[in-house]
Amino acid sequence: MISKYSNQKNEIKENEIKEAAEEIKNGKLVLFPTETVYGIGANALNADAVKSIFVAKGRAQDNPLIVHVSSIEMLKKIVKEIGDIEKKLIETFWPGPLTIIFKRNEILPNVVTANLDTVAVRMPNNIIAKKLIEYSELPIAAPSANISGRPSGTKVEDIIEELDGKVSYILDGGFVDIGLESTVVKIEGENINILRPGKITKEQLEQISKQVKIDKNVLGKVEKNEVVASPGMKYKHYAPKTECMMVYSENQNKMINKINEIVKQQKAENKKVLILCRNQNFDKYISNLKWNIGKTLEDMAKNIFTLLRKADKENIDLIIIEGVENKGIGLAITNRLIRSCAYNYIVL
Ligand code: TXA
Ligand code: MG
């Protein structure tokens, strides 16, 4: 199958979004942009269509999908109840990069939720995503657009090789805004539990409830056979093919010295090492092989996945990435980096 490709980058073509919506209605897959990362979408109410997402991604059957909606009416059709905290979260953060776990309705096929009695839902804030859902008049189940285990897709050029031919329609919306997947939360009593950190930060969630907890697996490593709050925590994630390592210290000089030391050692063994560093530290590294990941944490969030994918094309032996502090969106960056590095990290 050849995917129909629409290049929307600079202008949104209504008729193309409508064509893609027809594909969704017909049980086909559509690659589409959201404000966080690209998604591979299908009609969430059609079990066969949803199954084909798992096949396209090579995704484990027990890892449930996020359902994307464009209205509260649509949300009400797929969930049992909307609690008070959930209501406040919706009013404050939707449409936007926040996924909320609800008790699910029977209307959803089991394959979407991997047989759980809950469903993860979000209302995206990207105009193409919104219209795709509106025009198809269906909730859209969509995981991040990448082969399972690989870094998520933040622009079509990065993922076209691995997904072309696996979807019926590609809506190209250019480079996404945020670059990391949504924050996933589950409410228990007065507690907001963060299962996956993202652009909506702990500090922002604390405006809704004082009791915001970060699940221990956000920064910890899942043990074999451990029961986890979110199935996605168990799997290899966001990983480039190249070996990768994160180094962090609150003291920037300490971090830079450590990275320079590792680079020296690796070079002595004839290894090709790439440093991914912030703009402000760029000149402090001795190596010539270094890429700027941007100035702010927001820049870094946006650039990580695309740079890891780029590094995979360069025959590099080791990628060393600067870590960041776990505040604000820094928590989400750290969560992705330690997984990209398969827990190979040093904190000094
Ligand atoms: O930003 C995003 O959230 C992107 C865009 C496309 O919307 N989507 C995304 O989907 O990142 P995915 O499938 O890559 O990640 C969904 C995460 C997984 O870790 C999954 O285990 C978790 O959400 N999840 C889904 N349903 C759940 C549920 N009922 N309970 C707990 N965790 C759930
Ligand atoms: Mg994913």
Image: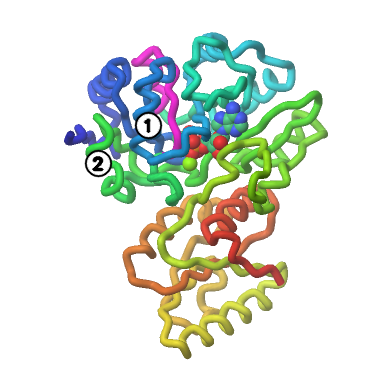
Check contact, mark 2 vs mark 1: CB within 8 A. no
Tell me the residue that label 1 is attached to.
Answer: 53
Q: Is mark 1 within 8 Å of ligand 1?
A: no
- What's under tag 2, amino acid-wise? Asp
| Residue 179 % position (x, y) | 48, 46
Residue at 73% from the left image edge and 46% from the top image edge? 216
* Figure check: 97 above or below 15: below
| Residue 181 % position (x, y) | 52, 41
| Magenta run includes residue 291 | no
Residue at 70% from the left image edge and 52% from the top image edge? 327
Q: Residues within 10 Å of mark 1 (few under 14, many from 20)?
A: many
Residue 10 placement, left or right of 210: left
Q: CA distance from mark 2 to mark 1?
A: 13 Å
Could you say whether the residue bearing mark 2 is in a helix, strand or loop?
A: loop
Q: Is residue 98 visible?
A: no
Residue 295 placement, left or right of 258: left
Q: Is mark 2 within 8 Å of ligand 1?
A: no
Residue at 78% from the left image edge and 30% from the top image edge? 191
Could you say whether the residue bearing mark 1 is in a helix, strand or loop?
A: helix
Residue 118 placement, left or right of 266: right
Q: Point out the tag, 2 or 1, that comes first from the N-terminus.
A: 1
| Residue 330 % position (x, y) | 63, 53
Q: Which residues are magenta?
A: 129-144
- Front position among marks 2 and 1: 1
Badge number at residue 39 = none
Residue extending furthest toward the front: 225
| Residue 282 % position (x, y) | 51, 73
Tell me the residue that label 2 is attached to.
Answer: 164
Q: Is residue 316 visible?
A: yes
Residue at 52% from the left image edge and 82% from the top image edge? 263
